[in-house]
Image (cartoon, rainbow, N blue to C red):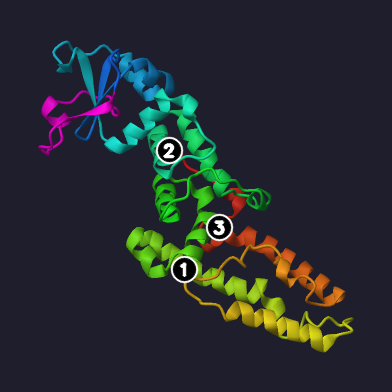
Amino acid sequence: MSDAPPSTKRKRTELVSSTTAPLVRSKIWKPYGDIILQAESTQFRVTRDILAEQSSVFRDMFSVPQPLNEPTIEGCPIVHVSDTAKDWELFLEILYNPFQSTVSRPYAVVASMLRLGKKYDMPAPKDDALRRIHAEFPATLELYDEKLATIDDEDDLYVHLLNLLYECRVYSAIPLLGLTCLSNERLESLALAVSRDTFVTLAIALERLLNFQSEKRLSWLHGNALIPHKSCNSRKACANQQMAINHSINGKEKYPFHLHYVIGDWHPEWSGKFCEVCEAAAREHYAASRQKGWELLPTFFGLPKWEALKDVD
């Protein structure tokens, strides 16, 4: 049986990997299965109906009569796929155990659903993966304030996700995820974990983010243009609090960079530090600059603004 995709028939010698790794039978080996999927050197016995129901690619392939002289295993034709065995193992486990669905899934499962869902035109798993990604890294400030944890936390999760989003062209989640990566990872660590093009994008974004954070979001802590307010009745006390907050922020370790002020909300510990007039002025400035930071966030990563930023199928 032909590879999937493409559906064009190729010689048997072309279907087999050039490696000599022995074939392995997966734990997903259904006794009533009527098709053998082979990914790398691992074979899965499944029913073609479950694949055809999910995927138009497999549905179209199975509708074409196959030559009678194709090799089989236990009477089942073999379909060679070019994906990793791990992706298929995780994906098939989800297909055969739908009632084990949880609010949160491991990254590897989400990645397999997205990769295979996009490649084989399987809307259900693809959309499930995208919903989870967008719930964690939304495209609106309102959803960001309410974001949910739908992907299990693990080491290097953000870097793995960033590579996945670029691979699968899920661009609308990259701005927030990129910011998260830069806030949690050292730049030299990122250089070893992402492609050169992605690293250049991150390095440029970091400079832009730091400039925006200092010159826009935290500008109310610099000089006296905003604090003390012209109507302030405790100018010295408010000026001292301004200096103290500025020192507490700029006195922190710079690496990894503290970028949560780029789109962060008003910090509760700042409340009550100033007179009512100065605090109101600071809050107003901080809220307006927060909205501006969110609007500009995609552009820091070389992407279009939110309204024009789309994922690519």
Measure the alpha-carbon separation of dots 1 and 2. Answer: 28 Å
Q: Is residue 181 left or right of residue 120?
A: right
Q: Is residue 260 left or right of residue 290?
A: left
Q: Position of residue 263 (x, y in %)?
A: 63, 62
**Residue at 38% from the left image edge and 34% from the top image edge:** 116
**Residue at 86% from the left image edge and 85% from the top image edge:** 234
Q: Position of residue 112 (x, y in %)?
A: 38, 37
By secondary structure, the bulk of the magenta-drawn segment is best described as loop
- Give the residue type at disc 1: Ile
The label nearer to you, 2 versus 3, is: 2
Q: Residues within 10 Å of mark 1 (few under 14, many from 20)?
A: few
Label 3 belongs to which residue?
A: 298
Label 2 belongs to which residue?
A: 114
Q: Position of residue 62 (x, y in %)?
A: 31, 16
**Residue at 60% from the left image edge and 71% from the top image edge:** 212
The label nearer to you, 1 versus 2, is: 2
Q: Is residue 4 magenta?
A: yes
Q: Is residue 253 magenta?
A: no
Disc 3, disc 1: CB below 8 Å?
no
Query: Can residue 224 be spotted in the picture?
Result: no
Can you name the residue that lies furthest to the bottom here? 236
Q: Give the range drawn in magenta.
A: 1-28
Disc 1, disc 2: CB below 8 Å?
no
- Give the residue type at disc 3: Pro
Label 1 belongs to which residue?
A: 204
Please, what secondary structure does the residue beneath circle 1 have?
helix
Q: Position of residue 30 (x, y in %)?
A: 30, 18
